[in-house]
Image (cartoon, helix red, strand yellow):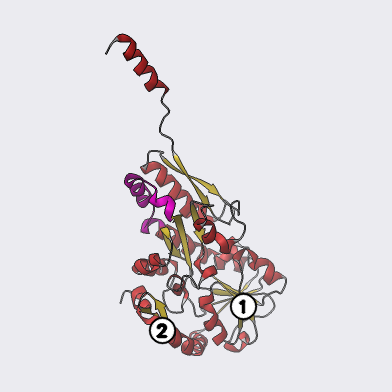
């Protein structure tokens, strides 16, 4: 190589741009100060940047910046508006009968147990999504927030209009004598305050996340239920377009460890949510063992029917219950 060629080659090398980082757009409808940001979204972004040496990064779009309708989070992911999205499968429970089944009464005891249960069933859960699942977790079992009527007995449920988290909850709520309606979680504070609903069934972390202690005067605990499902997912086309090395980085930055962080934050928030409600004057009503037994008996026919239901993928409710419980 002559001197001129060597100089030209060196100049070209110096002028060549550095490898461009790939940036993923992460959408969620809550504000940036929501605890899930610190517990799940930011750890995923930080771990991905760490293992990829900065070649894969994440930009967050909170507060509905990419989508102002919480139930449409899955749709915007499929449409490619977001590369990564947080979603509550309960909004579209008809598409995810296996995933949302974690809310069936008796499936699990708290957020961590429910998250572990979902990971025992991760294969059929993954099969329901046309997306790459990055994390799957659950919250604590539901409590009942009410404004005008304290719910202390089974009879107090008669005629109430209850906002439920998922369509999966409807037969059990109606077996208690109430009517059910599904509404986005972003509306529950206002709807209870304005009397659009008589009660809101949701886990007690809603005290902090949605300030449910403001409209509610009563909180009834120890009611039949279990956790609700949450997922962080990635557009499948985006994931499949990555190199094998890049896919490995995404896999390392996601999975069960990230899911358990989601479960832990909801376990902590549930305990704190009850205390914050009490501190703000909300009367905490815990069903006695005898009263809880009456509620359990009331929902048993609906539970038996669900156990016999074909959920798809060759599984009945009973099959899935055994999988959730590790039996």
Q: Which of the 4 image quarters holds residue 20?
A: top left
Secondary structure, mark 2, is helix
Residue 241 lies in the magenta-colored region = yes
**Number of residue marks:** 2
Q: Quadrant of the C terminus?
A: bottom left
Marker disc for residue 162? 1
* In magenta segment, residue 166: no
Labelled disc at residue 229? none
Kindly tell me whether residue 139 is visible in this rendering: no
SS assignment at label 1: strand
Residue 307: give its label. Answer: 2
Classify the position of the N terminus by image quarter. top left
Q: Residue at x 40, y 39 (%)?
A: 55
Along the horizontal axis of the image, is 24 left or right of 153?
left
43 in relation to 131, above or below: above
Place residue 155 in its image quadrant: bottom right
Tell me residue 22's x, y (percent): 44, 41
Magenta-colored span: 236-258
The vertical placement of 303 against 114, above or below, is below
């Amino acid at each position: 190589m002559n001197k001129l060629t060597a100089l030209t080659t060196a100049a070209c090398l110096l002028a060549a741009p550095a490898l461009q980082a790939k940036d993923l757009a992460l959408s969620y409808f809550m504000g940036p100060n929501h605890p899930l940001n610190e517990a799940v979204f930011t750890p995923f972004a930080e771990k991905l940047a760490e293992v990829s040496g900065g070649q894969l990064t994440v930009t967050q779009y909170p507060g509905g910046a990419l989508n102002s309708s919480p139930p449409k989070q899955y749709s915007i992911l499929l449409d490619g508006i977001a590369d990564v999205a947080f979603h509550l499968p309960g909004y579209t429970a008809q598409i995810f009968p296996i995933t949302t089944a974690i809310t069936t009464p008796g499936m699990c005891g708290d957020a961590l147990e429910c998250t572990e249960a979902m990971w025992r069933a991760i294969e059929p859960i993954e099969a329901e999504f046309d997306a790459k699942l990055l994390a799957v977790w659950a919250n604590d079992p539901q409590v009942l927030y009410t404004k005008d009527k304290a719910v202390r007995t089974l009879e107090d449920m008669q005629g109430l209009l209850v906002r439920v988290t998922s369509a999966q909850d409807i037969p059990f709520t109606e077996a208690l004598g109430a009517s059910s309606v599904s509404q986005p979680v972003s509306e529950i504070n206002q709807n209870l305050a304005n009397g659009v609903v008589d009660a809101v069934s949701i886990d007690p972390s809603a005290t902090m996340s949605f300030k449910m202690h403001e409209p509610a005067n009563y909180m009834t605990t120890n009611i039949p239920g279990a956790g609700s499902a949450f997922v962080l997912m990635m557009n499948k086309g985006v994931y499949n377009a990555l190199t094998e090395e890049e896919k490995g980085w995404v896999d390392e930055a996601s999975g069960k460890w990230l899911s358990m962080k989601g479960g832990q934050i909801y376990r902590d928030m549930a305990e704190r949510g009850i205390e914050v409600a009490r501190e703000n004057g909300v009367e905490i009503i815990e069903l006695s063992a005898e009263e809880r037994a009456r509620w359990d008996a009331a929902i048993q026919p609906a539970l038996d029917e669900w156990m016999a239901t074909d959920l798809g993928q060759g599984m009945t409710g009973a099959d899935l219950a055994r999988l959730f419980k590790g039996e």
